[in-house]
Amino acid sequence: MKHLFTLILFTSFLGLTACMKGEHVDLIIHNANVHTMNDQNSVEDAIAIRDGKIVEVGPERQILNKYSADEYVDAQKKDVFPGFTDAHAHILSYARQQISVDLVGCKSYDEMLVRIEKYQSKHDRAFIIGRGWDQSLWKSGEMPTNERLNELFPDIPVCLFRIDGHACLANDYLIKKSNVIEKYHSDPELHNGGHYEKIVLEIGGGIAGWMTDEPSGVFVDNAMNPILDILPDFPESELVEAILSIQDELYSYGITGVHEAGMKQFEVQLFKKLIDQDQLKLNIYGMLLPTEDNIAFAEKNGIYEHENLYIRSFKVYGDGALGSRGAFLKQTYSDRHIHSGYLCTSVERMNEIADMCTRLGYQMNTHAIGDSTNRVMLDIYRDIHEVDPDHRWRIEHAQIVDPKDFDLFTEAGVFPSVQPTHAVSDQRWVESRIGEHRMEGAYAYKSLLERFGMLAIGTDFPVERTDPFLTIHAAVNRKNGEDIPGNGFLSSERISLEECLRGMTIWAATASFQEKQLGSLEEGKDATLVIFEQPVKANAKFSPNFAFSTYIKGKKVYSVE
Ligand SMILES: [Zn+2]
C-alpha cells in the first residue's frame, strides 16, 4: 500500500514537471472560439503551433498545460477560422483594373467619359484602358456605342472593358488599328465564339430599329481577340504594386488563398518571382489558360508546386456571360429572340483539352454560364468519371442549369464552383434575359450542393467585390449588401452558414487537391488562420466584418493594430 502511494506521488510529480516545462511550441492562440471546420465541425478553445504547422487544437487548459510557447495570443473569445479561400478570382485582372480607368459603378455614359478624361489628364497614356462599366446600371440599360468616345479621342486607341470582362467598348481608332472587323469575318474561331454589336438606326415612332452592318463599338467574347492581341500590358512595377496591395486587402478580410481562374505563362512566372522575393504569401492555386506555352509548361512540369503556388488545372472558357449575352442557352434569349449565345471553345477542342488533362493528371475547370454549355461540359466530364471517380473536375459558375441536368452533377462527379454574389448582383436584370421559365435552375446553389455534396465558393473578383461577408450574405440570406431583396432572391436556393463557410475553407481546399494541408484547423495542417473582429454570423441585415489578425503558416501577415 505504501509503495502504491509513493508511485502515485512520483507519477503526479512527473506529470507536474512536464506541465511546468511543457512541450515547446512557437505560438499558442488561446481563449478563442476555434472553428476547426473538421468533419465534426467541432469548436475548441486553443491551438498550438510550431514551424508553421498545427501541433494540437483543444480545450484551453489542455493546450496551456501541455505546451510552453515563445508567444501567447489571447484571442478574447473571438472567432478563429481556417484562412478563407476565394475559390474563383482574378488577382491579375483586379491589379490591371486598379491601374486602368476605374469604371466600376458608373451610373451613366457621361460619368464614364468624365472618369476617362480625368484619368488621362493625370496619366497621359498612349493607349487608354478602362474596366468595369455595366450598362445595367444606366438609365437606358442599353449597350453603349462609341460615337462620343470617337469625338473625344479621335487619334488614340481606347478600350473599355465591361464589368464581366467578356465585352469591351472600342473606339473607331482602335477598331481600325486592330483590324478586328476583317479578322472577325475571316476567322471562324472569332465569329463562332463571339459577336459584335451593330449600330441600330431608329426608323421613327421609337418602336422598331434598322440594324446596320456597322460596328457600334462593343465586341463580345472571342470577337475581342484581335483587340486583346494588341493591348499593351502595364509596366511590371505597376502590376506588382497593385498585386501586393490586393494581397493586403484580402488579408484584411481573412482571405489567405485564391484560386486564380486563368493564368498566362508570364503571370505564372511573375507570381513565382514574387514568391521567391518573399512578397507574395497568399496560397495560390493556379488554373492555366490552354495557351501553347502553358501547355508546354504543363507537359514539362506535370503537377507543379513552388512554395505557395500550386498548379494542376486548366481553365477553359466554355461560353461568355449573361450580361453581354455571350452565355450559351438551349433556347434563345428572352430579350433577343434571334440570339442564343455560343460556345467560346469548340466541343472538339474541349475534348482535346480533356484528354490532355487526363494524361497529365490535371483538373479541367470550365467556365459555363448558360444551360447549354453546362450540359455540354457535363457530358464531356462524364467520360473522365468512368476512369477516375475522384477527378474533381469543376464547372466554374454553373449559373443557369436546366433542372433536368442537375443529376448529371452527381453522375459525372462534377465539382460546382459558384459565386453567390453573382446571384444578387444579376437579380436586377436576369429574368428579362432568360425568362421566368428558366429561373428554376438559376443560381441554384442548394440544388447543386445536394447533388455533389460540396461547393467551391468564390467571388470572381474584380467582377464582384473581394469581401467574403458579402458572399456569406448572398449565399445564406440571398441578399446584396443593401439587403435587397428583403425576402431574398430565389430564396429556396439558400444554403446554410456552415455550408457557405465550408465552401470557403475545407471544400475549397478539396476543390484544389489541398485538403491534406489546408482548409481546416487540425493537427499536421498549415497554421493558416484568421481571428475575426466580430462573431461570424449571417444576420438578416448585412453587418460588415473584418480580420482582427491573419496568419499564414504560423506567421502573422496582417493585424488591425
Ligand atoms: Zn472568372
Image: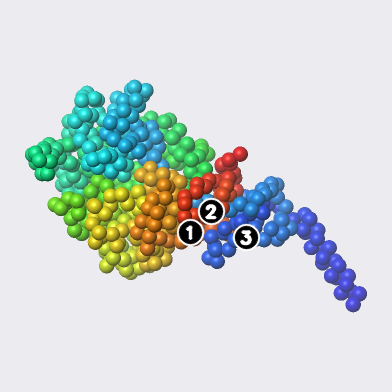
Q: In terms of secondary structure, where does tag 1 sit?
A: helix
- Disc 2 residue crowd, few under 14, some 14–19, many 20+, Cα 10 Å: some
Instruction: Point out residue 281 in the picture as x, y percentages from the top left corner.
Output: 51, 43
Q: Hey, what amino acid is under mark 3?
A: Glu
Quadrant showing the N terminus: bottom right
| Depicted 543 relative to depicted 203: above or below | below
Residue 521: mark in rendering: none
The residue that appears at 71% across and 56% down in the rendered structure is 64
Residue 44: mark in rendering: 3
The residue that appears at 43% across and 35% down in the rendered structure is 242
Residue 536: mark in rendering: 2
User: Rounded to the nearest whole Å, what is the CA distance between mark 3 and mark 2?
Assistant: 15 Å
N-term-proximal mark, 1 vs 2:
1
User: Rounded to the nearest whole Å, what is the CA distance between mark 1 and mark 2?
Assistant: 9 Å
- Disc 3 residue crowd, few under 14, some 14–19, many 20+, Cα 10 Å: some
Q: Residue furthest right?
A: 2
Please tell me whether mark 3 or mark 2 is closer to you in this view.
Answer: 2
Q: Is the residue marked 1 within 8 Å of ligand 1, measured from its CB? A: no
Q: Hey, what amino acid is under mark 2?
A: Val
Query: In screen coordinates, is 310 left or right of 38?
Result: left
Quadrant showing the C terminus: top right
Q: Is the residue marked 3 within 8 Å of ligand 1, measured from its CB? A: no
| Depicted 216 relative to depicted 16: above or below | above
Q: Are the two marked residues, 3 and 2, in contact with CB atoms closer than 8 angstroms? A: no
Q: Hey, what amino acid is under mark 1?
A: Leu
Return the residue nearer the eye: 133 or 387.
Answer: 133
Q: In terms of secondary structure, where does tag 3 sit?
A: strand
N-term-proximal mark, 3 vs 1:
3
| Depicted 180 relative to depicted 367: above or below | above
Residue 497: mark in rendering: 1
Query: In screen coordinates, is 57 left or right of 156?
Result: right
